[in-house]
Amino acid sequence: MKLDKDKFSVLLDVKHFSPEELNVKVVGDYIEVHAKHEERPDEHGYISREFHRRYMVPKGIDPAALTSALSPEGVLSITAPTKAPQVERSIPISRQEKPAVTGK
């Protein structure tokens, strides 16, 4: 997990899993990664794999901006830009026709 001034990123080696066997979701303030494949033959016999990872979304990161991608080498990257710092701005004042507080 890495947090730079302009980007948040998580990199995971998932070369033993196909994209269909991976699930990335946001639950509350956490990113959850689940990978699983059923038993399959390999050079030593049969193997099954499964893992769960959970990462807290840092402050200043919009969970809705998270994206994920799988590289040809089997590296899953989950990234999001950091929110731009709040810029000072003036708020215009409008005139109301009705009183804000009414007497009883």
Image (cartoon, rainbow, N blue to C red):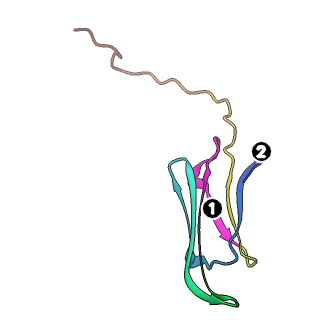
Q: Which mark is residue 18?
A: none
Is 49 magenta? The answer is no
- Amino acid type of the residue tagged 2 in the rendering: Lys
Please give left or right for residue 93 compared with residue 85 in the image.
left
Pointer 2 residue: 5
Pointer 1 residue: 67
Q: Position of residue 55 (x, y in %)?
A: 62, 52
Please give left or right for residue 98 compared with residue 11 in the image.
left
- Mark-to-mark CA distance, 2 and 1: 18 Å
Q: Residue at x 61, y 48 (%)?
A: 56
Q: Nearer the viewer, residue 34 or 94?
A: 34
Q: Nearer the viewer, residue 23 or 92?
A: 23
* Callout 2: SS: loop
The magenta stretch is 52-70
The total number of labels drawn is: 2
Residue pushed farthest front? 44
For the N terminus, give its image quadrant: bottom right
Query: Looking at the image, is mark 2 or mark 1 earlier in the sequence?
Result: 2
